[in-house]
Amino acid sequence: MALDSTAAAATSADLDQTLAVQERYGAAAQEQEACLCCAVEFDPALLDVIPAEVVERDYGCGNPTRWVSSGDTVLDLGSGSGKNAFICAQIVGAGGRVIGIDRNHDMLDLARGAAPQVAARLGYANVAFREGAIEDLSAPTPDGTPLVADASVDVVLSNCVLNLVNPAARGQLLREIRRVLRPGGRVAISDIVSDREVPLALQHDPDLWSGCISGAWQEDAFLADFRALGFEDVTYADRSDTPWKVVEGISFRSVTLTGALPGGAAARSGCCG
């Protein structure tokens, strides 16, 4: 069943794990935390130009960059240390553009500090990191324009971040993803899903929440919510056979959801697929 944002708001009105997420990821930007999410391997050639501290302090559960192509404008939601954004910078090339959005100051400092070094190694600069909440991409910037403009992006990707958003804001998050995409725009979302709904008792645990557990979407609902937005060919392009963790009998596993809006080519693998 697709997400009922009214019901989610009613059951999660008193739930706000933002501070727990900010504190944990702020600390993880300073020193690597091995237990955050479930990292996967990336093409070593794409990591060569990225500073080691950026790679080490990236916390994901998949590789959504595989669905990016040359010339794309890419929006990376919850860009963190910047690793995925810097990988995308190489795939899209000098003719493409990458925008990273994050609200954690420590992660933004890490990513922004590495950007000139990556640009120098590539020979071009096509990445910008902006501060903001991923569920509020229409928030005004100092010059009065939205953080991300309507229909300005070819691909929205995210790596184990959507589960950190308050369930009451999920409807807004999904609408914002839809708003910023051009006709034919694509999504590649790596995240943690659960085999059944996570009870509120677990959702109120700040450690489980910031650890990418208790904010997980239920597996079938994740697909249904993107279909309800009008995305076509919505599927799990990647899905781990073995659960990452089992908590109170609930299985949590990593997936990568892909899909495309009408009006352009369907979701496709990029050069690294």
Image (spheres, rainbow, N blue to C red):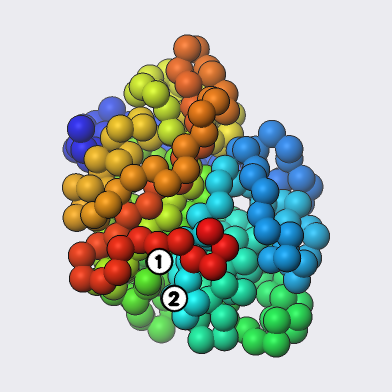
Farthest residue to the top: give it.
249
Q: Position of residue 92 (x, y in %)?
A: 53, 76
Q: Position of residue 271 (x, y in %)?
A: 54, 68
**Pointer 1 local density, CA inside 10 Å: few below 14, some 14–19, many at least 20:** many
**Pointer 2 local density, CA inside 10 Å: few below 14, some 14–19, many at least 20:** many
Horizontal arrangement in the rendering, residue 31 relative to residue 245 (left or right): right
Horizontal arrangement in the rendering, residue 213 relative to residue 145 (left or right): right
In the image, 177 versus 243, the foreground residue is 243
Residue at mark 1 to residue at mark 2: CA–CA distance: 7 Å
In the image, 194 versus 20, the foreground residue is 194
Residue type pointed to by label 2: Thr
Residue type pointed to by label 1: Val
Quarter of the figure with residue 12: top left
Does the rendering let one see residue 151?
yes
Q: Is residue 105 above or below residue 5?
A: below
Quarter of the figure with residue 81: bottom right
Q: Which mark is residue 134?
A: none
For the residues bearing labels 1 and 2, Cβ distance under 8 angstroms: yes
Q: Residue at 55% of width from left, 25% of height from top?
A: 242
Q: Is residue 131 above or below residue 8?
A: below
Mark 1: which secondary structure? Answer: strand
Mark 2: which secondary structure? Answer: strand
Q: Position of residue 17 (x, y in %)?
A: 48, 37
State the quadrant of the N terminus: top left
Quarter of the figure with residue 139: bottom left
Residue under numbered circle 2 = 73
Residue under numbered circle 1 = 155
Q: Residue at 57% of width from left, 81% of height from top?
A: 93
Q: Residue at 64% of width from left, 45% of height from top?
A: 40
Q: Residue at 54% of width from left, 19% of height from top?
A: 246
